[in-house]
């Protein structure tokens, strides 16, 4: 596979504290890579390293195949845009003036692509309005617009939807998808808003206490997130007895609600539940009826990314 970024046993140490510990990561070309981790897990530290804002204590990374200690790494960085922590914008300037300023900083000969970038980021109709009067979502989009001035192939966004309202979140999500699909931009995006990342990510990296706990593609994750049947019954006590007798795996949600898993977790699964025999929905319904379990409702339900994450991180499972 063609990787834009690989990290190889990266350490970042502050005194005796390891903010990153033997961290390895692989961002495929064309991916939207969601970096997921709790506060303080090391996401920003990692992004700062990749952007060259700080240096690893040990280990290395490659950007477009060039290693971090190669002097040509600057060339790879030119293909990379980033917003780490908050977007760096001039509050007393308009969107256009901010972009013009960025073109000057980059030493670009003309403002040819300016209108196109404003259009792409949904800022073409903001006129002379100063950035200080922009909403948080508009500022975030301007940050991305500024990052796009150098026509990057790879964009690194640290918590791009943090603090945004639902409309702002949708706008940023659509912008990311558009840039990925229409301009083939590869993304590395950090967030702790898991469900939001699950709407766009093609790959995930789960980071915890500076360790890469697991890397997984969205496709693999979808297969791992086991399908289950969410049932509402009059009483879960007889249901439990029946499910135990059938050897089925389940999770009780309340006195009247439960998730019943129809298949066993695979060996690579992070779910720590006991294995269960497979069963079809039809057979389950028949067994419930035979067992005199009064079913009030029944629907298919997928294990969410959040549950997957909690099982993975909650167990403190760390692959070295
Ligand atoms: P958040 O989601 O809150 O932004 P994060 O995952 O981005 O968190 P980092 O900011 O990378 O986490 O911090 C990782 C750990 O490294 C934290 O415990 C932080 O306190 C520590 N850390 C970061 N920078 C420094 C520094 N310059 N000196 C000492 N410790 C630091």
Image (spheres, helix red, strand yellow):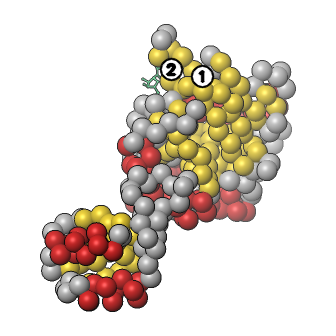
Image position of 225 (left or right of 288): right
Between 171 and 202, the one lying in front of the other is: 202
Image position of 129 (left or right of 183): left
x%, y% of residue 244? Answer: 28, 69
Between 213 and 287, the one lying in front of the other is: 287
x%, y% of residue 93? Answer: 55, 39
Query: How busy is the neighbourhood of tag 2: few (under 14 within 10 Å), some, or many (20 plus)?
Result: some
User: Where's the C terminus, which quadrant?
Assistant: top right
Callout 2: SS: strand
Between 113 and 46, the one lying in front of the other is: 46
Relative to residue 256, is residue 23 depicted above or below?
Answer: above
Q: Is residue 189 visible?
A: no
Q: Residue at x 63, y 26 (%)?
A: 10
Mark earlier in primary sequence (2, 1): 1
Q: Residue at x 47, y 16 (%)?
A: 17
Relative to residue 115, is residue 7 depicted above or below?
Answer: above
x%, y% of residue 279? Answer: 44, 78
- Is there CB contact under 8 Å for labels 2 and 1? yes
What is the distance, in whole Å, between disc 2 and disc 1 at their CAs? 7 Å
Q: Residue at x 23, y 70 (%)?
A: 240
Badge count: 2
Residue 18: which disc?
2
Relative to residue 59, is residue 198 depicted above or below?
Answer: below
Between 307 and 196, the one lying in front of the other is: 307
Q: Mark 1 — residue?
A: 11
Q: Is residue 20 visible?
A: yes
């Amino acid at each position: 596979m063609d990787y834009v970024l690989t990290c190889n046993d990266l350490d970042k140490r502050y005194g005796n504290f390891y903010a990153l510990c033997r961290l390895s990561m692989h961002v495929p070309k064309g991916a939207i890579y969601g970096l997921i981790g709790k506060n303080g897990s090391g996401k920003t530290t990692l992004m700062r390293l990749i952007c060259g804002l700080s240096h690893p204590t040990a280990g290395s990374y490659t950007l477009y195949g060039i290693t971090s200690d190669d002097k040509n790494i600057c060339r790879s960085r030119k293909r990379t845009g980033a917003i780490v922590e908050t977007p760096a914008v001039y509050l007393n300037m308009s969107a256009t003036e901010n972009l013009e300023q960025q073109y000057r900083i980059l030493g670009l000969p003309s403002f040819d692509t300016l209108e196109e970038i404003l259009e792409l980021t949904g800022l073409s109709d903001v006129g002379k309005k100063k950035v200080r009067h922009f909403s948080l979502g508009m500022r975030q989009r301007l940050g991305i617009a500024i990052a796009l001035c150098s026509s990057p192939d790879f964009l690194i966004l640290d918590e791009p939807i943090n603090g945004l309202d639902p409309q702002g979140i949708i706008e940023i999500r659509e912008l990311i998808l558009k840039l990925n699909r229409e301009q083939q931009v590869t993304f590395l995006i950090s967030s702790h808003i898991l469900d939001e990342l699950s709407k766009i990510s093609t790959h995930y990296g789960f980071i915890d206490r500076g360790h890469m706990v697991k890397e997984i593609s969205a496709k693999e994750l979808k297969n791992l997130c086991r399908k289950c049947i969410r049932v509402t019954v009059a009483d879960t006590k007889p249901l439990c007895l029946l499910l135990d007798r059938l050897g089925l795996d389940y999770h009780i949600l309340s006195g009247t609600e439960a998730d019943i898993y129809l298949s066993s977790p695979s060996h690579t699964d992070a779910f720590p539940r006991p294995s269960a025999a497979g069963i079809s929905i039809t057979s389950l319904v028949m067994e419930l009826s035979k067992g005199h379990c009064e079913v009030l409702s029944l629907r298919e339900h997928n294990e969410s990314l959040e549950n997957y994450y909690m099982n993975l991180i909650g167990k403190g499972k760390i692959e070295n």
